[in-house]
Amino acid sequence: MIAPIFRCAKRMTGLESCPATYPAMQHNPANFSRTLLAAFAAAFALGQAGCGSKKPEPEPPPLAKPAKPPKVETRTLHELAASDDNAALLKQLQLGQTADALDNLGQTALHVAAINGKAENLETLLTYKANIHAKTAKEKIDAFHLACAHGSVEAAKLLLAHGANPKSSAPNGWTPLHSSAVNGQDAIVRLFHELGNDLSPMCADGTPLDFARIHKKTTTEALLNSLGAKKGATLSVHLAALHGDMDALKSWLSIRANIHFRESKHQATPLHWAAEADQLEAAKLLLNKGARIISRTDGGWTPLHSAASKGSTNVIAMLIKRRVPINSISQTGTPLDLAIGYKRDNAAAMIRDKGGREGWQVSIHMAAAKGKAVAVQSFLQRGVKVDAVDSLHRSTPLHWAAGAGKVNTMEMLIARGATVDARSESDATPMHQAVLRDRPEAVKLLLNSNANVNLKNKSGYTPLDYATANKRTKITQLLKSAGALSGKAL
């Protein structure tokens, strides 16, 4: 800036072009100084105005800041349901997200919100038509059940207000109150009491009070007791046996019919339940009161089968001491088969040590079902009839082989004269068994062996009826091609 101003001042004073023409200034320093100062002042003013310098280029206008891209929601609906971001959840639902979609755990967003106690999110989801009765894919329980299991009182209240069923149950019979008791959710217990709901619902394993006791939830047990909840042993002789509640069991057994009373699901007696739970004293009491040591369930299990399946070694030892038949055959084999199958190694060793054997070793029917053709031949060589009937349902070895799809064994039995249309106790044929168990290769063999496809059982059903009812497409085609008809058409 100084250099251009200095040059401008020299031009104004004439010093730059011809200093010799101004001798007066050279000989009068005062005049020279005044002239030079004036020139500098003028030059400076001109410099401010742009004299002596290049006019600066105008600066470009500032660039506009780029607009922020719209925020993309990366969280899933289930993640939002578990969060406190209700606004984001609402937005996704408004954009069309499906409220009842399942995540990889088989849960809907409503289930997730219930687990996490997010009442506001539950309200939003229900507004967008989330199914309040939807069940989880694995446990088969609804949002209310989950809220109770996790102690989410506000969530439970909201769901009830929207029509949730407080008596809904899982396939194992557990109600929301059972799950609350297992997890020690006292606040949920109080909620049920305040609403006047039953505090003693029953399932196969007992009442919520039983669950609290078994799982050592002492405060919950005390609370349920104080509210008048009942233990299962006072409601069921089977539960008294299962839990080893001797006082309750003695009370039940004062009525003799209860000794042999059978539950509805599997027709098991109290002795079966005591054996399963290894309740030695309860089992002894039942036997001393007249319980049958060889009573069978609908699947042919004796109390020894029940004990073997659970590894109940105390009861096994007692039953063996009382000379229980150790190789009784059920639909699933001998007690040893069950001990092996359920990996009850100690029980298996104990039974084997006392002469226990696997089913195929002692029964032609089990050998046929296992496809042990050599063992089947051995039984036949020892004089067992090829159409020998079992003690359970009066089924032949061919019935058992057909139901298991053991084609090689079936061929051997048929070659040895087995009746292809043999009837069981219910008039079922081997063809009925093959169809019921979805064994198309067995069906083909029976068709090739001239089995009658239109025989009806005692219920009036033909093999085709079972094939169509159970959606056995391939078998249905095979049967129809052989002229099969439904029972109603015959």
Image: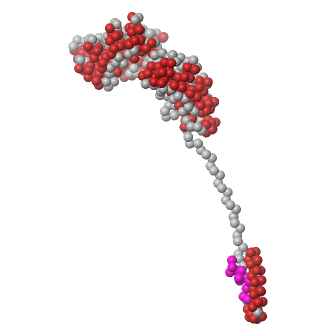
Q: In the depicted view, which residue is nearer to us: 235 or 16? A: 235
> Farthest left residue?
382
Query: Can residue 146 be seen at all in this image of the molecule?
Result: no
Q: How many marks?
A: 0
Instruction: Give the image location of residue 394, x and y in percent.
Output: 34, 10
Image coordinates of residue 123 in percent, x first then y, are: 62, 30
User: Is residue 399 left or right of 114 when viewed as pictured?
Assistant: left
- Residue at screen point 32% across, 12% down: 284
Residue 11 within the segment the image draws in magenta: yes
Quadrant of res 305: top left
Q: Is residue 230 visible?
A: yes
* Residue in view at x 54 percent, y 37 percent: 79
Which stretch did the figure color magenta?
A: 1-16
Residue visible at 28% across and 24% down in the picture: 346
User: Which residue occupies the foreground of this view, 476 or 159?
Assistant: 159
Give the position of the N terminus as an image quadrant.
bottom right
Asked which quadrant contains residue 19, the reply is bottom right
